[in-house]
Image (spheres, rainbow, N blue to C red):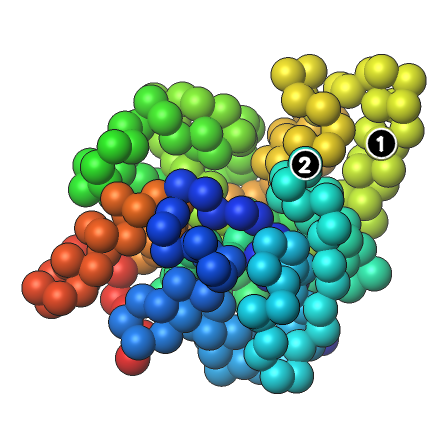
Amino acid sequence: MTNAIILAAGLGSRLSPLTKDKPKSLIEFGKKTLLERIVEIFRKYGIDDISIVTGYKKEKINLPNITYFENKNYRENSTLSSLFCAQKKISESTIITYSDIIFQENILEKLLNVDYDISAVVDRKWIDYWKFRTGESIHDATETAIFNEKNMIISIGEKNPHANGHFIGLMKLQNTGSEKFQEIYFKTRQNCINNKNELNKNLSFEKLRIVDLLQGLIKMNCPVHSILTDNGWLEFDTINDYELYSDMYNKNILSKLIQLSS
């Protein structure tokens, strides 16, 4: 049985003032919050075991029938540490997602139907999407991905305007992939105690991202498969993003980027 972990601990400072009194996952878009949209799509596809990692303004997140984990150090760490606040929920089949994105149902359906141990959803038309965004150029994108002709990811998590894909913040671990992911995490944590951060020498252990660990697995010749999409998702990273999407929604042209569920 597949379960899901939603990472919703971050400050969302670039979305200020919308995040002054609530986490960015509770920003309303199209009459629903981002978090409600994610939870609804999971439940529609039979995923009822859902966990949310909270942090900033954690008391505001109170959806029913959810397991909650708190990231008490959300100001000092990043997505990887946040995920491992819910480590006991990393099972034989676990979907992991950022909370500041929304995505089409067919993307989740495709991810659920693959049998790979480690899968990450990658947008191969990401540059077309980035052209819509203001104040965010392709040179600023920090989680680009390169995949080969077999759809295997060979690089992820760098700034690379020439990359043929971009990680959307949605992935799945299953079978031995869950074990390998956890194994490298704890090995890296131990190495960092000895001042040997082999995943990303530019970051402290606390600041490591999920994509840094994925890149570490790739370097160890552990297969990471790309699940390809042609847009079909939105990232709410800045106030410019929110204003752009809201304008497109009001003009009924958001379908250029995503088929939004009602």
Classify 83 as above or below 42.
Answer: above
Residue at image location 41% in from the left, 70% down from the top:
33
Residue type highlighted by circle 2: Glu
- From the image, which quarter does the N terminus lie in? bottom right
- Which residue is tagged 1? 189
Residue 102, position as x, y percentages in the image: 40, 61
**Position of 65 compared to 161: left or right?**
right
What residue appears at the point 30 percent right and 76 percent down from the top-left corner?
A: 31
Residue 247 falls in which quadrant of the image?
Answer: bottom left
The reply to whether residue 205 is in sight is: yes
CA gap, disc 1 and disc 2: 16 Å
Question: Mark 1 falls on what kind of element?
Answer: helix
Q: Label 2, on which residue?
A: 76
Which residue sits at x=76%, y=19%? 198
User: Which residue type carries mark 1?
Assistant: Arg
Q: Position of residue 160 (x, y in %)?
A: 40, 22
Residue 63 versus residue 123: which sits nearer the camera?
A: 63
- Going from the N terminus, do you reach mark 1 or mark 2 first? 2
As drawn, is 28 to the left or to the right of 74? left
